[in-house]
Every structure is written in C-alpha cells, then in structure tokens.
Image: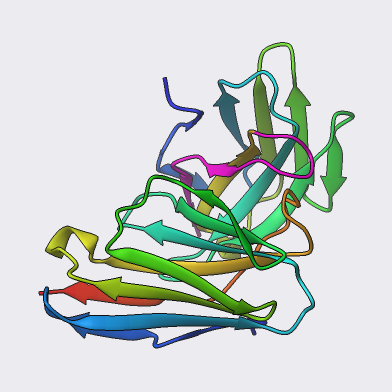
Amino acid sequence: RKEVEQDPGPFNVPEGATVAFNCTYSNSASQSFFWYRQDCRKEPKLLMSVYSSGNEDGRFTAQLNRASQYISLLIRDSKLSDSATYLCVVNIGSSNTGKLIFGQGTTLQVKP
Amino acid sequence: DTEVTQTPKHLVMGMTNKKSLKCEQHMGHRAMYWYKQKAKKPPELMFVYSYEKLSINESVPSRFSPECPNSSLLNLHLHALQPEDSALYLCASSQEWGSGELFFGEGSRLTVL
C-alpha cells in the first residue's frame, strides 16, 4: 500500500462547480498534512495546511479525519484558474523531523 | 517569483559526464531538500539537509552526491548517470526540518543521453 494515495483523476468540471478531492495515508503516526498545487511544468506551491479542526481559506476548505486516515480538499465556485494538479502531502515523521511524502496528485480541469 | 533559485534550468549530459546542479536560498531557512520528479508523477524525496547536515538519504544511488557548503547553498553532483535518471530535479527549503511549508525552486530539467 502506498504511503499517500490520491485519485489521479482527471476531474473535469464546469466553472462554478464544487469539487472535492480525497487523500488517504497509511501511517497512523503522521503528524501534519498539507495540500500543494502544481501547475503544468511549474514547481509545487503550498496551497494550505490541514488542521485537525478543519480550515478554510476563501473558496478552499481542507479537512482531516484521523480515525479514517484521510484528508480532503473542497473547492467551491471553481474558476478556470483553479485548473492544476493538487498534491496531498503528509509528514510521516514527527513534527520536527520526518519525511514529506507527496501523493500522486489529482488533476483538475475547469471548463468554461 | 520563487525565492529558491536553481541553476541550470536545463542540462543535457552524457553517461560519462560529471555535472552539478545548484540551489540557493536567502530566506534563512535551515532545511533544504532535493526531490526528483518524473513526468506525470509526484516529487520523490531524495535528500534532506538540516542545519547543513545530511539528515535523510532515501537510498539514492551513489551516482548522485549531495553537498551543502553553507546554509544558503545546496548542490547535487552528478556522475555516470543513466538515461532513466532524466527528470526534473527540484530543490526546496523550509524554515526548519519538519515544517510542511516547502518553498520550491523552478527545477533543473535533466536529460541523460
């Protein structure tokens, strides 16, 4: 079983749609969780951290379910500019060491 | 604009060549990383340096040799590579090792002939 798993998609949605991505992780000791965004032929950039209580940043909401070992990302009112690959990242070590492991990414294509 | 600078952006080398990839950051970050990314795949961790000391080596073949001359610089020395080593090599830094906020450079795209 992979340490971090995502549905690769692609997810093709119309502008204005709401779309959700899930990511599962295998190491129950994982401490911290993140969503990164990677545009085509660009470097990954941090989108948001995922906190135990869930967190929201504008149209983006991230949630963590430790019992089921998954994190989610919800995008509301999709924009054309949201088209990218969304990478789930898990720190599988302790908070001040560990390894940041990337999921294979979920590709989102927002259509006009 | 990225605050992590990688050179060169593109590199083509033969299997007998020796070359180096360079990475620089001036954000005062104490952790630096090398990741390898193949097309349509996620970045794969290669090495982690924390306070200029090698902290993680993900069983990377010895034909890849990392070096951290000081807190701002990270090099990756390449020797006797194979065609399957062709990939995008991404350098990243973070405030401390374990921080999830990685700042990536634009990468060095390597082709091994």
Is residue A15 placed above or below A7 in the rendered structure? below
Is residue A40 placed above or below A23 in the rendered structure? below
For the point 67% across and 12% down, which residue is it? A68
Is residue B27 placed above or below A83 in the rendered structure? below
Residue B10 x, y percent position in the rendering: 32, 84
Residue A44 x, y percent position in the rendering: 55, 62
Question: Is residue A33 something that shows in the picture?
Answer: yes
In reply to whether residue A98 is colored magenta, the answer given is yes
Frontmost residue, A84 versus B60: B60
Residue A45 x, y percent position in the rendering: 63, 63
Q: Using residue B15 as the reference point, say whether residue B31 is left or right of it.
A: right
Frontmost residue, B76 versus A38: B76
For the point 40% across and 80% down, which residue is it? B21
Frontmost residue, A9 versus A23: A23
- Specify the segment rendered in magenta: A93-112
Q: Using residue A96 as the reference point, say whether residue A23 is left or right of it.
A: left
